[in-house]
Amino acid sequence: MVSAIFADRPVKKLVLFDVDGTLTPARQRVTPEMLETLHGLRKKLVIGFVGGSDLSKQQEQLAVDGKNVVDDFDYAFAENGLTAYKMGQALPSASFIGYVGEERYKTLVNFILHYIADMDVPIKRGTFVEYRNGMINVSPIGRNASIQERNEFEKYDKEQNLRKTFVSTLKSKFPDYGLTYSIGGQISFDVFPTGWDKTYCLKHVEDEGFEEIHFFGDKTYQGGNDYEIYKDSRTIGHSVSKPEDTIRILKELFLNDA
């Protein structure tokens, strides 16, 4: 039976969303049309987002009029659910450094920074390694790149496979670290302990008794950061290429009587 906290929802299902490319264009703000769709959906069933970024970035993209984003979704899963909220209340979290250990972490990051220093890419900006609570995010051009620079690098990377090659090198160099490397967004990839992909968030919801758990994401191919949860037997996966696809499918599945 679904938790009493969700007793007001007539449909006992949970819908989870990736953020970049699914609810919003990459690193951009949510549109009024998406907000309206989510507002209508939340009246019928339980909704949540699960992103690889830290909560501050999801706040920038999804929050409206200065509100706290964790209050606009029933579940808020930052860093794949390693930082988690249910109805605005924090759930237990986990630490990347606590798993890897400080010395091994420094060895990993030093190698990454040397590798990036030797990479021949069109531009380099800043913040090449971003530490998050449950993972690190690695960007060959740096997370300080502008939207236009991100778009250009994404096209360049599709031709040169820079991120795929980088990931392959790290897998070979650190085979005993127990890490997973997941390409997501336009300019970076995530590094986290194996099993700490987006399926990690399901441990917070699998005992809630939902009839179905749906997941919407755009990086659902193998190696993409939505792949594991998209393919998981506990979810019904929906692959999209842009937020407009998400809205269309939601209307077809859940809002066709609106």
Image (cartoon, rainbow, N blue to C red):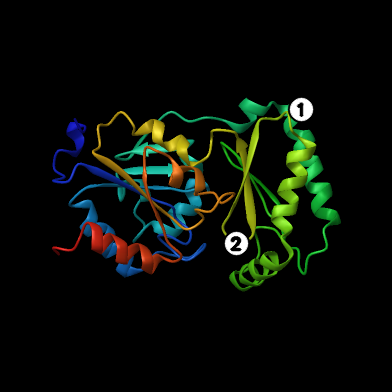
| In the rendered image, the vertical position of residue 120 relative to residue 18, given as above or below | below
* Left or right of residue 91, residue 95 in this image: right
Residue in view at x 54 percent, y 35 percent:
196
Residue assigned mark 2: 186
* Left or right of residue 40, residue 57 in this image: right
Type of amino acid at the residue the image marks with label 1: Glu
Mark 2 neighbour density, 10 Å: few (under 14) some (14–19) many (20 or more): many
Residue 228 place in picture, x, y as percent: 50, 43
Residue assigned mark 1: 103
Type of amino acid at the residue the image marks with label 2: Gln
Secondary element type, mark 2: loop
Residue in view at x 23 percent, y 52 percent:
42
Residue 130 place in picture, x, y as percent: 65, 47
- For this rendering, which residue is in front, 5 or 220? 220
* Left or right of residue 246, residue 109 in this image: right
Disc 2 to disc 1: CB gap under 8 Å: no
